[in-house]
Image (tube, grey):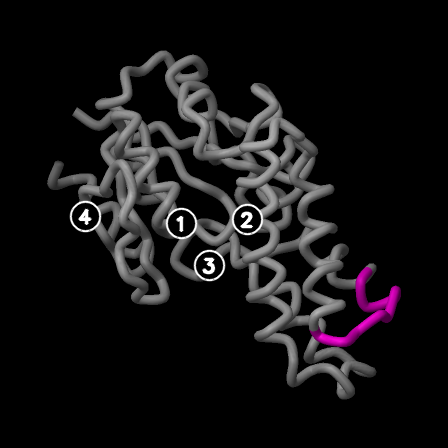
Amino acid sequence: MIKACVFDAYGTLFDVGAAARIAAGEPGAEGWAGKWPQIAADWRRKQLEYTWLRAVAGAHADFWRVTQDGLDWALENAGLSDTGLRSRLLQLYWDLAAFPEVPAMLVALAAQGQRLAILSNGSPGMLDGAVRSAGLGGVFEGLFSVESVGVFKPDRRVYELVGAGLKLAPQEVLFVSSNGWDACAGAAYGFATVWVNRDGAPRDRLFGSPQHVLSDLAALPGLVESL
C-alpha cells in the first residue's frame, strides 16, 4: 500500500527551463534571445553530468556550485560572456515556477491522505527557495537533500533518506521523477516508481525500470488511487 508520494524537484515539480525562457523575453535580451532553448538544454545537461562525475570521483560540491558550473559551460558554448546575463539567470533559478498541473495534483494527493515529500540533488537552501517561490510552502512533510549524505543521485544512500525520514519501507513509497535514470534507480532501490516523461523520450536501459510512465503529473492522483 502506498503511504507517501516522494518527488524529485527540478524538472519534475519545478520548470528548470523557465529561467532562460523568462530572461530571453526581458528588455535587452534581443541579441541572444534566439539561443535560449540551447542555453537551457546545455545548462541542464551539464548540471546533471557534473553531479554524476562528481559522485563517481568522490569530489562532491553542493548543487548550487554545480548549477553555476553548468551555466558557465552553457554560456561559453553559446558564445556569451555577459556577467549581467549570468547573474540574472542564476537569480531566476531561485524563483522557478512549478509546472501548471502541480498545485492541484498535490492538493488531490493530500486529500487522499498521502504523505508528500521531496528527494532532490538540490541543497536545502535551494529547495526551501523553490518551494516558497512556487507557492508550495507547508505542503511537504520533508525536503530531503543529498547534502545529508554528501553524494548525488543515483547513489543508494540518497534513496535511503526517504525511509529514514518518513519511517516507511521502500514499497510504501511512490517515487516520482522526470529523469528517466532517476526513476530507474528508484525502482532498483525498491520504490514503486513513476517516470514523468514530459518529452516523450525513450526509456533508459539501466539497472531498474519504472513501473509507470506519465506524460505529466495531472493523472498522478488517479494512478495513486488505483494502486
- What amino acid is at disc 1? Asn
Callout 2: SS: helix
> Is residue 196 or residue 98 the one in the foreground?
196
How much space separates mark 1 and mark 4, taking CA atoms?
21 Å
Residue 77: which quarter of the image? bottom right
Callout in the foreground (2, 3): 2
Image-based side of 9 in relation to 187, left or right? right
Q: Position of residue 166 (x, y in %)?
A: 40, 17
Residue furthest right as drawn: 83
Residue wearing tag 3: 99
Callout 1: SS: loop
Q: Position of residue 116 (x, y in %)?
A: 39, 32
- The numbered mark, 4 or 3, whose residue comes first in the sequence reads 3
Image-based side of 129 in relation to 208, left or right? right
- What amino acid is at disc 3? Phe
What range is drawn magenta here? 78-86
Q: Is residue 43 above or below residue 158?
A: below
How much space separates mark 2 and mark 4, taking CA atoms?
31 Å
- The mark found on residue 222 in the picture is 4
Residue furthest left as drawn: 226
How much space separates mark 2 and mark 3, taking CA atoms?
20 Å
Q: Residue at x 58, y 75 (%)?
A: 37
Residue wearing tag 2: 48
Callout in the foreground (2, 4): 2
- The numbered mark, 2 or 1, whose residue comes first in the sequence reads 2
